[in-house]
């Protein structure tokens, strides 16, 4: 069996459109790599030399302002694709928030493979359009939503995106859902455009109102899906 046969995100990643022979060819040009929290895979402004599928773990996409401040502009989850195929330079860096496993390809090799496999190019287009939709929703969140709406939206997205592979989790059927956030409180504040004090106050309010429970700094138990959805606006 090839690595592709054993991949836990095989049916959700962009390579899901490929048949066994095509997967074998793709596997021949890729390699699996494990990166540690804080380790970067892609650097902002550098030549686009590699692309990758995320198999496990969570990474942040970030850019730096002129005065050196970091702004997190996106979060990458298992089955997501990162890098810039057919491109020159990267507009943001990609850094692991948790230990992560990625399937890495030389960008030139991947570009050549994609040109020969229209189904893969189609998947790339679908992913690009999906990212555009998420970016538009994120603009709404940052520009129009209140602090409580931002945090509730963030927690609901985490619960959805951090599901184990193959899990069709439904809040109403499964009851409370425990998630381990890959972010510190300061990082959550940075992502949502809030202060850490505001984020902490909203977490406390959600806990007091029994929307969530907080057994530790990183663990969150979502108790009331309906109320959280309403809070998210």
Image: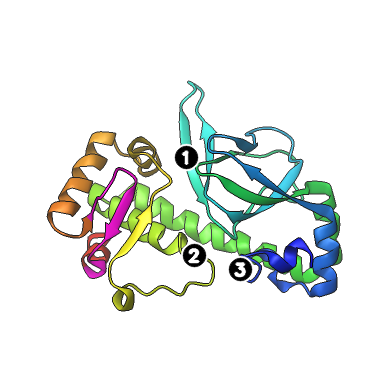
For this rendering, which residue is in front, 22 or 215?
215
Cβ atoms under marks 1 and 3 closer than 8 Å: no
Q: Is residue 102 left or right of residue 31?
A: left
At a point 74% along the width and 44% down the height, the residue shown is 50
Q: What is the spatial separation of the Cα atoms under label 1 and label 3, in whole angstroms? A: 25 Å
Label tally: 3
Q: Quadrant of the C terminus?
A: bottom left
Q: Which is in the foreground here, disc 1 or disc 3?
A: 3
SS at mark 1? strand
Which residues fall within the magenta stretch?
Answer: 213-226
Say which residue label 3 marks.
12
Residue 131 in the magenta stretch? The answer is no
Q: Which badge, 1 or 3, comes first in the chain's sequence?
A: 3
At a point 34% along the width and 56% down the height, the residue shown is 155
SS at mark 2? loop
Q: Is residue 175 left or right of residue 91?
A: left
Say which residue label 2 marks.
164
Say which residue label 1 marks.
72
Q: Which badge, 2 or 1, comes first in the chain's sequence?
A: 1
């Amino acid at each position: 069996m090839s690595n592709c046969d054993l991949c836990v995100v095989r049916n959700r990643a962009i390579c899901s459109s490929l048949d066994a022979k095509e997967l074998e060819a793709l596997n021949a040009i890729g390699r699996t790599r494990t990166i540690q929290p804080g380790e970067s895979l892609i650097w902002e402004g550098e030549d686009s030399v590699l692309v990758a599928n995320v198999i496990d773990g969570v990474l942040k996409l970030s850019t730096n302002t002129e005065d050196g401040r970091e702004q997190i502009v996106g979060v990458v989850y298992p089955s997501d694709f990162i890098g810039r195929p057919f491109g020159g330079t990267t507009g943001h860096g990609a850094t692991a928030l948790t230990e992560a496993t990625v399937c890495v390809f030389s960008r030139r090799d991947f570009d050549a493979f994609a040109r020969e496999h229209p189904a893969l190019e189609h998947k790339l287009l679908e992913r690009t359009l999906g990212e555009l939709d998420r970016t538009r929703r994120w603009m709404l969140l940052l520009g129009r939503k209140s602090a409580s709406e931002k945090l509730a939206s963030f927690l609901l997205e985490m619960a959805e995106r951090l599901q184990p592979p193959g899990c069709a989790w439904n809040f109403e059927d499964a009851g409370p859902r425990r998630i381990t956030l890959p972010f510190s409180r300061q990082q959550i504040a940075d992502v949502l455009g809030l202060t850490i004090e505001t984020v902490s106050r909203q977490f406390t309010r959600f806990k007091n109102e029994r929307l969530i429970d907080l057994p530790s700094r990183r663990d969150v138990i979502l108790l009331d899906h309906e109320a959280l959805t309403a809070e998210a606006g």
